[in-house]
Amino acid sequence: MWNSDNPYLNGNFAPWREEGDAYDLEVEGEIPRELNGALYRIGPNPQFEPLGPYHWFDGDGMAHAFMLREGRAGYRNRYVRTDGLKAEMKEGKALYGGLLRQTAEVPPDRPPFKNAGNTNIIGYANRLLALWEAGLPHELKPETLETVGLYDFGGRMTGPVTAHPKFDPKNGDLLFFGYQPFPPYLTWYRADRAGRLLESREIDSGLSVMMHDFVATDNYAIFFVCPSVFSLEKMAKGEPMLAWEPQHGTKIGAMNRATGEVKWFYDEAFFVFHFLNAYEENGSLVVDGCRMKSVDMTGNSFGSPPLPWRWTLNLKDGDIKQKQIDDTSSEFPRFDERLAGKKHRFAYFAAHLGQRAEETGFNTIAKRDYASGKLETQSLAGGKYPGEPVFVPRTPGAAEDDGWVLAVWYDPAVNSSELAIVDAKNFSGKPVARVKAPHRVPFGFHGNWVAA
Ligand SMILES: [Fe+2]
């Protein structure tokens, strides 16, 4: 691929170069009739040969949809047509640099960064949104994946929107934040299910860091300020703009959603890309996530493996209790999101069994039972590489874990991908359906199920 030895431009990290539509895909097994809707996924998929060093997070967003209806499946993929990508398509070459190095190719009348629109894709306010944490979301048409344009909550939002907003299950409110490398570093937002921005509140986090995710309970929004620190000076010199500065430690802010008051907790330095969930219990906040000892954002080797971790934050005395749940390296944590902010029992991850090989991706999906400690895995007989697993409840009123886990897998033996649908209660058993994609689907970031 472009004569590059960058692992994130090769194998199934390499971009898929065509857009298309396919219908009536080959299915092994039977797609449950209850699954009517689409599994949307998104990830980086550079259209043009990168100008400088390429970071996995830089690639142009490509949205993928597996549309399921009455037991049949279709597939569609489209680039998110951002302003930056459109400018590059007009010139027929890359204009923008990325996380590791900015370039001088961007015309002075254009913003210095391309909003890649590549990180997460959600259904919200009767729209489909492609999210990227350093800018506004892009609105896509759910039926066609056609890009409508930037989505700014009816003109109310100008700043960046995290790629990991949460839905408040009691009213459908969208809870989110934005961060930026200059004050105010962090802003909390709440919007209703119709897209009306209801609340915005600046938080003095004191440090300019990359903050990929957060977590919320009924009464608190919880922000982990991990010391992956921005430097505008380094950026100006053309160096990687993020540095690991463990001397700051990690601090955790629990913002009271009613008063805005923030209680801070202090710990040694560590890093979290993704949280699973949080809930309130006995005067404490219990937070589950995937903890790394450190993170390296100066290249494509992220550093230490992510491990399942639980923090218990005592709101009265500021004490942190924490534990590693087990030693299976796990990322892309998902759960039954009807329980967002409430006590969960089950969670689903992309995971590594055995020696971790970053360049081939994860080799299994895993289900963790936080009550019993049991870990179940599903590897599709091995030799295949899954993305993030997404849980879909069987019915709106079904119990936790009563439903399906959907993941897109890559099989290097046939250089193609499939959507595997597993019964969550028979996680390690034979998948109920394996839907063959018409071609490989590159490893990406996040996705969500949107019911028809
Ligand atoms: Fe993420």
Image (spheres, grey):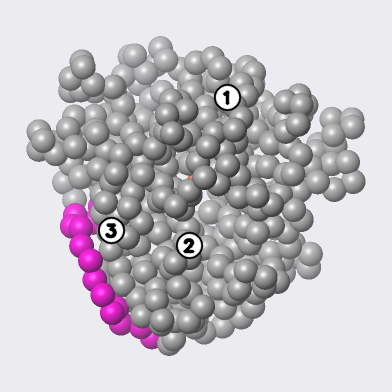
Q: Is residue 319 left or right of residue 376?
A: right
Look at 39% across and 46% down and name the residue there: 130
The magenta region covers: 11-28
Cα–Cα span, label 1 and label 3: 34 Å
Look at the numbered disc 2 and say if its residue's Cβ is closer than 8 Å to ligand 1.
no
Look at 69% across and 52% down and name the residue there: 170
Q: Secondary structure at mark 1?
A: strand
Cα–Cα span, label 2 and label 3: 16 Å
Q: Nearer the viewer, mark 2 or mark 3?
A: 3
- Please say if the residues under marks 1 and 3 sit with CB atoms less than 8 Å apart: no
The answer to whether one can see residue 139 in this image is: yes
Q: Nearer the viewer, mark 1 or mark 2?
A: 2
Instruction: Report the residue marked by disc 1.
Output: 186
Amino acid found under the numbered disc labelled 1: Leu
Note whether 412 is above or below 343 in the view shown.
below
In this orientation, which residue lies closer to the viewer: 230 or 119? 119
Look at 48% across and 65% down and name the residue there: 451
Label whose residue precedes the other's in the sequence (1 or 3): 3
Q: Position of residue 276 (x, y in %)?
A: 63, 51
Instruction: Report the residue marked by disc 2.
Output: 449
Note whether 443 is above or below 427 in the view shown.
above
In this orientation, which residue lies closer to the viewer: 162 or 93? 162
Amino acid found under the numbered disc labelled 2: Trp
Is residue 275 magenta-colored?
no
In this orientation, which residue lies closer to the viewer: 99 or 84? 84
Amino acid found under the numbered disc labelled 3: Thr
Instruction: Report the residue marked by disc 3.
Output: 144
Q: Position of residue 109 (x, y in %)?
A: 21, 17
